[in-house]
Image: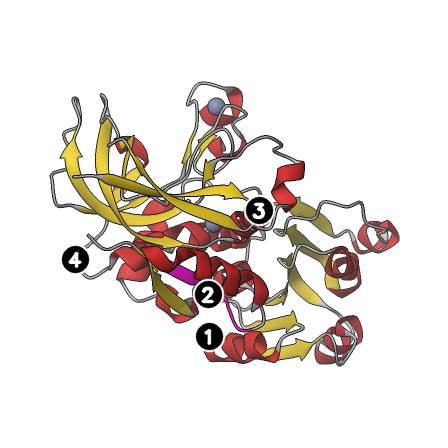
Amino acid sequence: MNNIAAVMTGIRKFEFQEIPMPKVGKGEVGITVKDIGICGSDMHFFNGDAMKIFPNSLPFILGHEIGGYIYEVGEDVSNFAVGDKVALEPGVPCCKCEMCQSGRYNLCKDVVFLATPPYNGGMQRYISYPAFKTYKLPDNLSTLEGAMMEPLSVGLHAVRRGEVKLGDSIAILGGGCIGMMTLLAAKAHGAARIIVTDVANSHLDKALELGATDVINSKDSDPVEMINQLTGGIGVDVVFETAGIPATAAQTSYIVKWGGTIVMVGNILPEVSYSFRNIYRKEAQIKGVFRYHSTYPIAIQAVSTGKINVKSIVTGVCDFMDSHAAFVNSLDNKDHCIKNVIHIND
Ligand SMILES: [Zn+2]
Ligand SMILES: [Zn+2]
């Protein structure tokens, strides 16, 4: 067995390098990586944006949405066997701090997260990984679906934070991968009215296909006006900001219902001018979402039992050696890409 990684050596640059086989330590499993989803955060590195937050992090290996097979079982691991099909939860928390102890381990300050400097990601043929953050996939799921458990986890956690329940009306601002995952999760939780806004008609068509009841192209019409019109002026129970841009963030307080909830899912780096007047007079609440916790078993079950179809958001699959082209495509062809997946052959 020889290990090959796609190493990011510069902005928009990959090099395939032969690297040592990973050592499978105590409590770990060795995994043959099969499918990796290209995430928005990977693209932030690829185009150089994330280098402002993580300077001097190159060379670096991207990828944290991983499905694969076990090729080796380390010492003290009894619940896995060679050949098991698995999904990896990419964050390994310390398990000791206050946040970990309270169950909100996504807020652990000492988390080791794949493809977040200084930790390399999974765009390599083989990796070793802690068994307690590795999840067995049922026979009816593919490794591609395994890789999709990560973005689905973000959607599930967002919907949980928003406490979406049967009959709720929701608005999702941004129809990219996370917006779509939020849609799928909200639908599974019983949301009745699902309004999606985006600037790309192809994303809005996809949203309708996945169960959105209304879509708004925010290039053509004012989403605040449209949502208020659609809801008879009362707004929606839960608003999800998933686009990660100041303009959609600023819209949230205008479209949330009195007593409703705003969930901030997108990565918004600049400060935003915001109407807090809407928040206090509506007694609305704003909640943040940072990654997810305790979602993998639920995500796997929801997909395995057909409650959620994650394959429906995959817009492209490519071979490992074509990874670079897939990244360029994800970046330059955003309007037509929702989720590209890299398939690593033997
Ligand atoms: Zn991701
Ligand atoms: Zn911790």
Q: Does the magenta stretch include residue 340?
A: yes
Q: Is mark 3 on a helix, strand or loop?
A: loop
Q: Is residue 210 above or below residue 128?
A: below
Kindly report the distance in space between the C-alpha atoms of the residues bearing marks 1 and 3.
34 Å
- Residue under numbered circle 1: 210
Looking at the rendered structure, the kind of residue marked 4 is Asp
Q: Position of residue 298 (x, y in %)?
A: 35, 50
Kindly report the distance in space between the C-alpha atoms of the residues bearing marks 3 and 2.
33 Å
The region drawn magenta spans 336-341
- Residue 341 visible, this angle: yes
Q: Is mark 2 on a helix, strand or loop?
A: helix
What residue is drawn where x is 43% and y is 35%? 120
Kindly report the distance in space between the C-alpha atoms of the residues bearing marks 4 and 1.
24 Å
Q: Where is residue 309 in the image (x, y as percent from the top left)?
A: 36, 67
Image-quadrant location for residue 197? bottom right
- Residue under numbered circle 2: 184
What residue is drawn where x is 41% and y is 23%? 95
Label 1: how many Cα within 10 Å (few below 14, some 14–19, many 20+): some
Looking at the rendered structure, the kind of residue marked 1 is Leu
Figure label count: 4
Closest to the observer, 119 or 20: 20
* Callouts 2 and 1 close, C-beta under 8 Å: yes
- Residue 182 visible, this angle: no
Q: Which mark is residue 139?
A: 4
Question: Would you say the beta carbon of the disc 1 residue lies within 8 angstroms of ligand 1?
Answer: no
